Amino acid sequence: DGGITQSPKYLFRKEGQNVTLSCEQNLNHDAMYWYRQDPGQGLRLIYYSQIVNDFQKGDIAEGYSVSREKKESFPLTVTSAQKNPTAFYLCASSIGPTGTVYNQPQHFGDGTRLSIL
Amino acid sequence: AQSVTQLDSHVSVSEGTPVLLRCNYSSSYSPSLFWYVQHPNKGLQLLLKYTSAATLVKGINGFEAEFKKSETSFHLTKPSAHMSDAAEYFCVVRGYQKVTFGTGTKLQVIP
């Protein structure tokens, strides 16, 4: 069954530590996205990637970094520069780049909840 | 410019009564519109989508939504609420370059 797998489900970060959230998809989708979800604020875009080895900043990229070395994988690193990392992080994918197939829905993983120790 | 407004942050209904979750949007282009559902500590699951075909869209679990261009609305309805419908619902507009999420409506179903 195709889908998106995020791991771990729960993650704890110590002061000054970088942590990496994993996102893997087997849907053969070109585009992948990272969102941050805080209560009452909906979803905010952190980074997105339309093709391998290319990615763009979203609305709240400061303190985060990503890589896209493989089509299936889009890991997110929360760096120590992100001063308020406690949130629910969601990874999503869709068939194509936003501009060409914008009527296609995004598919979501089950999220990673990050907390500060 | 593109935006989406979910008019109610919380909706409470009794089991077996109709559900109405309201969504208004604005977009410079003809947008695609989606409704997603999110259960606690889970990702978003697609309920239905509108992509300029029929204005009344049927989705999963008995939900449907009607696209009204004159009112710039895309309200989600269900004739009879079930306990399992208790969740948070997101209206999403997708334009040429951007995806915009509403802030969500939490649906409570009272037995």
Image (cartoon, coloured by chain):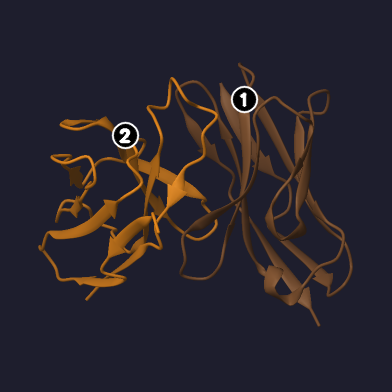
Q: What residue is disc 2 on?
A: A30
Residue type at mark 1: give it: Pro
Instruction: Name the side, left or right, on which A97 lies relative to B38.
Output: left
- Residue B42 rendering spot, x and y as whole percentages: 47, 66
Q: Quadrant of residue A7?
A: bottom left
The image position of residue A68, as x and y in percent, is: 18, 39
Residue type at the position of mark 2? Asp
Supply the letter of whichever chain is orange: A
Give the chain letter at badge 2.
A
Residue B2 drawn above or below residue A6:
above
Instruction: Report crowding for label 1: few under 14, some 14 to 19, many 20 or more residues within 10 A (C-alpha).
Output: many
Q: Which residue is mark 1?
A: B31
Colour given to chain B in the rendered image: brown
- Residue appearing at x 19%, y 33% in the figure: A52
In the rendered image, the quadrant that contains the C terminus of chain A is bottom left
**Is residue A18 shown above or below A116?**
above
Q: Residue at x 34, y 39 (%)?
A: A29
Q: Residue at x 21, y 47 (%)?
A: A63
- In the picture as drawn, the residue positioned furthest to the front comes out as A1
